[in-house]
Amino acid sequence: MTAETLLHIGDILGAHGLKGTLIVFSHTRPAQAIAGYSCWWIGKTAASAKAYPVRRCWQHGKRMLAEIEGVTDCDQAAPFKKLKVWVPLDVVETDDDEYLWEELIGCQVLRAGSNALLGTVTALEEYGAQDNLLVQTPDGAAEPGEWLIPFIEDVVTDVNLDDGVLIVDLPEGMDVCFTPRS
């Protein structure tokens, strides 16, 4: 498995109990969807990740707990703290109107109507109500800075992953979501 073919879906926070159970923060939505993957690749980076079959995974409060093959006590679980959980991209299923964050990063963002380039998606952030795109203005822009654009249907009107382009229709007053760079 190569780093380019793995998707980061969770983080191991530590051990739970004496039997080597791992505490996992899931990045999947819903969080329980992480339990649907029978094998996790675990490592500090995708390139260093190794495959571990998942024996059992369940929700415990706001976190997920998991038992993986080869880890049967807290001493064996301890080195997994702060490692990342990855799965192969080819096992991840999305609906037609769903996108992986990794697919959106690097896309150009154009303003609806004028097709004016606002910038490039550099990251996504989750703020509870909705995800937000962080869009960096292009080099040489008249007003360099960063946009924070809600990733909602009313604002992001078209996503074309083949061309790497998002079309946004910014409502009036949306300029308050722009932070100039000095």
Image (cartoon, helix red, strand yellow):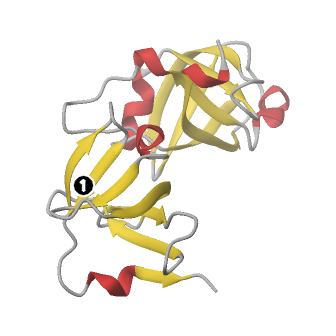
| Other-residue count near label 1 (Cα within 10 Å), few / some / many at <14 / 14–19 / ≥20 | many
Q: In this view of the protein, which residue sits in the foreground, 103 or 7? A: 103
Residue 134 appears in view: yes
Q: Locate residue 1 relative to residue 74 in the image: left or right.
A: left
Q: Locate residue 96 relative to residue 5 in the image: left or right.
A: left
Q: Residue at x 35, y 87 (%)?
A: 176
- Residue 74 screen position, x and y as percent: 79, 32
Q: In this view of the protein, which residue sits in the foreground, 27 or 142? A: 142
Q: Residue at x 44, y 31 (%)?
A: 34
Q: In this view of the protein, which residue sits in the foreground, 76 or 160? A: 160
Q: Which residue is drawn at 58% across and 65% down?
A: 139
- Residue 36 screen position, x and y as percent: 39, 23
Total count of labels:
1
Q: Which residue lies under the disc numbered 1?
A: 167
Residue 9 position (above or below residue 35): below
Residue 55: name its quadrant: top right
Q: What element carries label 1?
A: strand
Q: Residue at x 85, y 31 (%)?
A: 75
Residue 38 position (above or below residue 133): above
* Residue type marked 1: Ile
- Residue 153 screen position, x and y as percent: 16, 56
Residue 133 appears in view: no
Q: Locate residue 182 relative to residue 120 in the image: left or right.
A: right
Q: Locate residue 103 relative to residue 165 in the image: left or right.
A: right
Residue 150: name its quadrant: bottom left
Q: Can you say which quadrant of the picture contains the C terminus?
A: bottom right
- Residue 71 screen position, x and y as percent: 73, 20
